[in-house]
Amino acid sequence: MIVKSRVESLELQILRMLNARMKLSPKEYSNYLYLEKGYEGEVIFDRRMEEVGKSFLVMNDLLLEHGNTKFQIDSLFISKIIHLFEIKYFEGDYYTEGDRWYTNNGVEIKNPLQQMERAESLLRRLVRDLGFNTNIESTLVFVNPNFYLYQTPRNLPIIFPNQIPRLLHNLQKQITPIKNTHTNLSDRLLSLHSQDSPYKRLPDYSFEKLKKGIACSHCHTVNTIVNRKTLICNSCGKRENIHEAVLRSVKELQLLLPEEEITVNKVHEWCNSIKTKKPIRNTLLENYTLIGSGRSTHYITKNE
């Protein structure tokens, strides 16, 4: 049973939007691709684990803290044992030398086992401090079939793509009834989950610097045109109702620039390709709360 669903991180959502509207630096673009691929791998893992996960309490994308140290967990399966899963979508050939990990062309990367062991150690102390005595087993799971690791020592807690069926089989054998203790633990961990604000890590940008237009909901490019009541993407052919496209664009503007006031003129400039302001005004009136009058008129999210 899923206790905490997986969602795209705020950082990934914003970087995806920025990638369509400005030129990211090589480092920023690399980070964006890393987050995109990471999320893709986690979704693949979720699909593979969907059936067996119904018998556990499943928590995804946890950001916890112990002793003033924050740590992130990709997936927890809670039952008699806590299963911690670190998920990687590495692609291509890698090799190890002792505790060091390298890409096939010799570039050293962070050791994912050490990353997992750090999370396990902090989680173990946190669980103990919460008053629970539950064993924790950690597993590093690679989900991309185009990944190969040379010189892998035996007996490491690693699952390669072709070993996932074995992992599922082993988890099936460990299924036990969910007890109140397990539910109480998941509730406590969920209450301690925190949101990580990405804005300090993002590139410098402003309303004026960003490319204007409505981004495609499918391929995310700002290469769209409006034909009457339909948004059409010139890159992938995706078609979308104009009111849905405007509403999505307003939410994008709020996410990228939360300090900006939402006005008809601002949204009209942001969407760029809509000739008249009528569909924008109608969409805002239907979905937002009107505040003020005259030049001070703006819209806020309902129930704010």
Image (tube, rainbow, N blue to C red):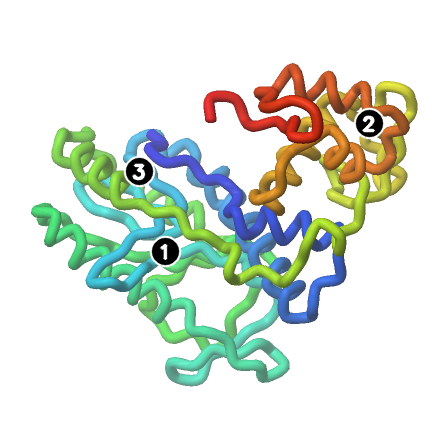
Q: Amino acid at mark 1?
A: Gln
The image position of residue 35, as x and y in percent, is 56, 56
Residue at x-position 61% and y-position 20%: 290
Marks 1, 3: nearer the viewer:
1
Secondary structure of residue under mark 2 = strand
Say which residue label 3 marks: 172
The quarter of the rendered structure image containing the N terminus is top left
178 vs 231, nearest the viewer: 231
Of callouts 1 and 3, the N-terminal one: 1
Q: Nearer the viewer, mark 3 or mark 2?
A: 2
**Residue marked by disc 2:** 239
Is residue 113 visible from the viewing direction of this image?
A: yes
Residue occupied by mark 1: 72
Q: Relative to residue 274, is residue 1 drawn left or right?
A: left
Residue 140 coordinates in the image, percent (x, y): 39, 59
User: Residue flagged by tag 2: what amino acid is it?
Assistant: Arg
Report x, y in % for residue 16: 66, 50
Is residue 232 found left or right of 282 in the rendered image? right
- Seen in the picture, residue 112 relative to 96 is either above or below; the reply is above
The alpha-carbon separation of the residues under discs 1 and 2 comes to 37 Å
Mark 1: few/some/many CA within 10 Å (<14, 14-19, 20+): some
